[in-house]
């Protein structure tokens, strides 16, 4: 990658043409327009390129450059511009593809907002539809003392970032583009073997600029990924930072985030259809804040609450450890409550086949379950009620992207005599009730996931939508003790249906349908049915993209035992409950403290050992004791919401990791991974809300009694607490006299 170092001496004009990542950013013009917002001002040339940046209350001049680039295209003709009523300015120019000669009009619009500068891009094609990568390129031109942060799986330079499997990455791209699943499962298994599960790095760490190419959402725990479209550049010495925030409300398809050692940042969107009938619309914000990753992420959480807040606040009542298990609900409730256990993602497999989670029948009608045992809604409800009486919650297994079992490519003879009975057989259901939802590759072959020939379904299909909505309506009516659903297999949202046209996607020079767009459409119909009746929606984020989470109340991450997936999920769950997978006893070995402390640090609860656990950790005396040791600490962070104020917490000499959560009766501070010290000093800054006062400080340690009366002192810098540690860890409970926790105002 080549950067913009040549421009560093020219704060208001670009004197040299550039090569590499920022090739499209050469602009010899002078600044002609200035747009200002809170602690932020940008100077823009007549070509619509940002050539100057001022940050902070003192409006410090920053050598900076930013613009929109279409890959493989050149600008032709003059640039038109006009001022806007809102105090902004708009630029319009024509781009022509260098090979195909296809054309489009690109509009860049900059407007001041309350706490940011809004940057909108609109692309309208002419002639036949086409596609090319759409890049937003920015560069802070003196990167030597800068740090970069995004919502990544692993920060670079931490010593634990594995080399991405190049063949796996290529297969993932092919799968997403062509709906070709051949050899992907084997490649994924081989790739995950290269990602040791004990290698974890703190994703809350900013790092010097590096050459990165990150995939938005990742795939099945793969590294080199990010889950929230934010890019933060920080100058710690001046306490200045700028975040580029991509709106999750935009209909994004695939995106990469690329950076270079020279301070370049590029958001690259692909597979968008450029046409006259459906303009591509992208929205971003430039946000100024203090040099802390919390500043940019906190702004984004406040700006887009629909994606970060649970739509149903009842979800906070479910917050805690989980299980994925069958059984009949005979549990040692007292023991599990000491482990902070809260919910079971129902793995009894009462359903007859995948995709028919709640059959459309009356309460006492029976059917053969997946295990060929008699099942009924009455039995399901009885189990839910038993768990509820024990103080636990049940989420029913649900799936909107897969269906059937042992599905044949060619429709077999229909078994059902009446349409109302098609649900009873997997092949009947897939081939005769929801045939339009079947995803096939370009050759017409049915796409299946290799698990008992379950086929991939596109939930944009009206017949499948009708079936799924009917299932949740039955749940609401017949399963009153159920707390909702947990949706599996979000990994399929990464692919395109080559036989559907969603009006926005363009793959291999032809229309296609993104299963991510299908998911968003389906969830917006499904969610109100559950939320209006007090039930919640969790999901298994095998594709970790914040723009897929608008209707979700929480997460149960099946890849949570992989450090990469845990980090990506945790960052999406700053204000939502999240549970990570604990696969087996080896997940705790050789150092169980490491597993529990990374969960504490990130506010994610682990999966506990219970009877009839399904491909999760089994009961064992040593395992149970590990969970009991950390149970009080986990219980103390139930209902957590990350505090995202800049510089709100620090540990003296960086002797340990620390995070800060708001909880129902105050705050919880997990202090973890301390380096050979028995005590650390933790400083809290600008934490307390008006009227709040600290009334009590308590330290919890793994496997030890709690310690009250911690030493603390208040100064102009903040509140400093001396925290004793055991096993490199403590959780400090900060109780306040008038704490008001927004997240606990349940409806």
Image (cartoon, grey):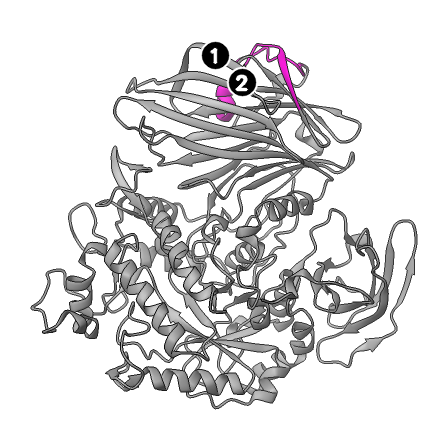
Is residue 229 in view from this perspective? Answer: yes
Relative to residue 597, is residue 270 depicted above or below?
above
| Residue neighbourhood size for the residue with mark 1, other residues' Cα within 10 Å, grouped as few (<14), some (14–19), many (≥20) | some
Residue at image location 61% in from the left, 73% down from the top: 592
Quickly name the residue at label 1. 79
Q: Which mark is residue 48?
A: 2
The reply to whether the magenta stretch includes residue 359 is no
Residue closest to the eye, 163 or 37: 37
**Residue 261: percent from left, percent from top:** 59, 33
Left or right position of 688 against 576: right
Residue at image location 81% in from the left, 51% down from the top: 686
Relative to residue 357, is residue 715 depicted above or below?
above
What quarter of the picture does the C terminus occupy?
bottom right
Residue closest to the eye, 743 or 488: 743
- Mark 1–mark 2 contact, CB under 8 Å? yes
**Residue 301: percent from left, percent from top:** 61, 49
| Residue neighbourhood size for the residue with mark 2, other residues' Cα within 10 Å, grouped as few (<14), some (14–19), many (≥20) | many
Relative to residue 686, is residue 608 depicted above or below?
below
**Residue 365: percent from left, percent from top:** 26, 84
**Element at badge 2?**
loop
Residue at image location 28% in from the left, 82% down from the top: 371
**Element at badge 1?**
strand
Relative to residue 127, is residue 391 depicted above or below?
below
Left or right position of 96 against 604: left
Quarter-of-image position of residue 210: top right
Residue at image location 57% in from the left, 58% down from the top: 573
Looking at the rendering, the stretch of residues picked out in magenta corresponds to: 10-35
Query: Rounded to the nearest whole Å, what is the CA distance between mark 1 and mark 2?
Result: 8 Å
């Amino acid at each position: 990658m080549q950067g913009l170092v040549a421009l560093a001496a020219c704060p208001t004009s670009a004197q040299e043409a550039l090569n590499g990542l920022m090739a499209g950013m050469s602009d010899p013009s002078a600044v002609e327009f200035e747009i200002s917002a809170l602690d932020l001002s940008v100077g823009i040339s007549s070509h619509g390129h940002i050539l100057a940046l001022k940050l902070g209350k003192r409006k410090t001049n920053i050598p900076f450059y930013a613009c929109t680039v279409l890959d493989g295209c050149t600008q032709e003709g003059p640039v038109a511009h006009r001022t806007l009523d809102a105090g902004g300015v708009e630029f319009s120019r024509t781009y022509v593809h260098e090979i195909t000669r296809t054309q489009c009009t690109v509009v860049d619009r900059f407007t001041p907002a309350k706490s940011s500068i809004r940057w909108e891009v609109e692309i309208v094609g002419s002639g036949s539809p086409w596609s090319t990568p759409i890049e937003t390129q920015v560069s802070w031109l003196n990167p030597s003392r800068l740090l970069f942060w995004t919502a990544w799986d692993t920060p670079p330079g931490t010593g634990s970032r594995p080399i991405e499997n190049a063949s796996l990455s290529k297969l993932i791209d092919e799968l997403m583009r062509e709906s070709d699943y051949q050899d992907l499962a084997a490649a994924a298994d081989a790739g995950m073997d290269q990602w040791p599960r004990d290698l974890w790095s703190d994703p809350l760490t900013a790092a010097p600029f590096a050459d990165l190419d990150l995939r938005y959402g990742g795939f099945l725990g793969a590294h080199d990924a990010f889950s929230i479209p934010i890019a933060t550049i920080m100058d710690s010495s001046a306490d200045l930072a700028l975040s580029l925030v991509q709106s999750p409300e935009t209909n994004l398809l695939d995106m990469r985030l690329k950076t270079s050692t020279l301070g370049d940042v590029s958001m690259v969107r692909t597979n968008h259809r450029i046409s006259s009938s459906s303009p591509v619309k992208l929205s971003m914000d430039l946000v100024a804040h203090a040099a802390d990753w919390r500043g940019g992420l906190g702004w984004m959480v406040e700006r887009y609450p629909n994606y970060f807040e649970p739509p149903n606040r009842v979800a906070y009542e479910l917050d805690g450890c989980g299980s994925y298990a069958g059984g009949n609900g005979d549990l040692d409730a007292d023991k599990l409550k000491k482990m902070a256990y809260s919910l079971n993602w129902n793995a009894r497999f009462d359903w007859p086949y995948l995709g028919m989670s709640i059959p459309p029948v009356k309460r006492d009608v029976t059917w053969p379950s997946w295990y060929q045992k008699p099942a009924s809604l009455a039995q399901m409800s009885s189990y839910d009620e038993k768990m509820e009486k024990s103080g636990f919650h049940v989420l029913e297994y649900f799936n909107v992207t897969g269906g059937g079992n042992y599905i044949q490519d060619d429709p077999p003879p229909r078994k059902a005599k009446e349409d109302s009975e098609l649900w009873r057989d997997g092949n009947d259901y897939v081939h005769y009730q929801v045939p339009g939802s079947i995803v096939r590759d370009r050759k017409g072959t049915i796409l299946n996931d290799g698990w008992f020939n379950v086929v991939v379904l596109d939930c944009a299909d009206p017949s499948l939508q009708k079936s799924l909505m009917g299932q949740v309506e039955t749940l609401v009516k017949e399963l009153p003790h159920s707390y909702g659903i947990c949706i599996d297999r979000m990994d399929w949202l990464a692919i395109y249906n080559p036989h559907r046209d969603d009006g926005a996607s363009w793959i291999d020079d032809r229309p296609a349908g993104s299963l991510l767009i299908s998911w968003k459409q389906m969830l917006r119909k499904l969610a109100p049915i559950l939320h209006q009746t007090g039930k919640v929606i969790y999901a298994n984020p095998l594709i970790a993209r914040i723009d897929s989470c608008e209707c979700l109340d929480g997460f149960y991450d099946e890849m949570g035992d992989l450090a990469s997936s845990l980090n990506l999920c945790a960052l999406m769950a700053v204000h939502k409950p999240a549970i990570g997978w604990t696969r087996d006893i080896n997940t705790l070995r050789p150092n169980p403290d490491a597993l529990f402390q990374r969960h504490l640090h990130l506010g994610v609860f682990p999966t506990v050992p219970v009877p009839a656990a399904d491909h999760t950790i089994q009961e064992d005396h040593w395992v149970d004791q590990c969970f009991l040791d950390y149970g009080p600490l986990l219980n103390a962070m139930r209902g957590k919401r990350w505090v995202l104020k800049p510089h709100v917490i620090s540990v003296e000499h960086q002797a340990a990791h620390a995070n800060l959560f708001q909880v129902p009766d105050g705050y919880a501070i997990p202090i973890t991974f301390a380096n050979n010290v028995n005590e650390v000093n933790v400083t809290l800054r600008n934490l307390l809300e008006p009227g709040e006062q600290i009334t009590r400080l308590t330290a919890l340690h793994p496997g030890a009694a709690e310690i009250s009366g911690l030493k603390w002192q208040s100064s102009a810098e903040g509140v400093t607490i001396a925290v004793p540690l055991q096993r490199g860890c403590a959780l400090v409970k900060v109780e306040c006299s008038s704490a008001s926790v927004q997240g606990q105002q349940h409806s």
